[in-house]
Image (spheres, rainbow, N blue to C red):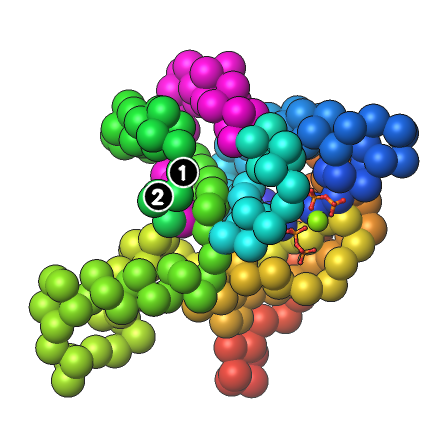
Amino acid sequence: MSALLQHVAIIMDGNGRWAERRGLPRLEGHRRGLETVRVIVEETGRLGIPFLTLYSFSTENWRRPLQEVQGLLALFEEAILRYGEELKRNNVRVRFLGRRDGLPEHLKAMMHELEEQTAINQSLTLNLALNYGGRDEILRAVQRFQKAQGDWSTLSEETFRVFLDTENQPDPDLLIRTGGERRISNFLLWQIAYTELWFTDTLWPDFTVSHFHQALEDFARRKRKFGGLG
Ligand code: IPE
Ligand code: IPE
Ligand code: MG
């Protein structure tokens, strides 16, 4: 694995279509998507990539029918119950990115508990973006900055970035989007300034370790220049 690859971010799209194509309820697609999450988290740990960020629910996803939103929120609770112990055992540090208010109290408590219980873990840092929007994150960071010091004359990219939900984590090197759309959908707007993008038509429930490797191999061939001459 390339030493230059520290952080992978994924827009896990296509769950709904996966289910619809099979005549199943959309929620069944989200359930299958959770299986993919488990496989990819494990593989990321095995490869020794230190940071993985998964887009799980956007600030815009509240626009979906109530039944789907409620089903997703219930699925997040179920996922924490089912996989929390495994994550702890595997030394994974879990962080939630996004706006906490608006989420059910019970889920918020479970998220907080999992973060606390995994805070000292040192293998993979798994960021779960839940009720997350990139613009919302930037505005919340501005508010935090003002609360903490409020001296705009000292504001720089380096002093500002630590107020983002990703705090002092490295920016993603690679962003994968499954499900065929070629857009960012309000994900990590600040952090992806120089991220390499990789798109696939494969729907998230069909995404395998082999697709993941394909993305990583493609990344390894990219020449990053960051505005310089490389
Ligand atoms: C992504 O799958 C998961 C979430 C947004 C929660 P979608 O539910 O957007 O699946 P499609 O795009 O409708 O197929
Ligand atoms: C992005 O997928 C959000 C998540 C994967 C959680 P969407 O399906 O919500 O994005 P759009 O609506 O197609 O842009
Ligand atoms: Mg979608």
**Residue at image point 34% right, 53% down:** 165
Question: Which range of residues does the magenta coloring cover?
Answer: 73-98
- 227 left or right of 23 in image: left
Cα–Cα span, label 2 and label 1: 6 Å
**Residue at image point 70% right, 29% down:** 27
Instruction: Name the residue tied to disc 1.
Output: 103
- 107 left or right of 14 in image: left
The image quadrant where one finds the C terminus is: bottom right
Residue 100, numbered label: 2
User: In the image, residue 118 lies at what x, y percent?
Assistant: 31, 27
Q: Considering the numbered disc 2 on the image, is that residue within a helix, a strand or a loop?
A: loop
| Picture layout, residue 1 above or below residue 44 | below
Residue 162's image quarter? Answer: bottom left
Instruction: Please tell me which residue lies in front, 194 or 106.
Output: 106
Verify CB contact (< 8 Å) between mark 2 and mark 1.
yes
Amino acid on which the number 1 mark rests in the picture: Leu
Instruction: Please tell me which residue lies in front, 203 or 57.
Output: 57
Residue 95's image quarter? Answer: top left
- 169 left or right of 212 in image: left
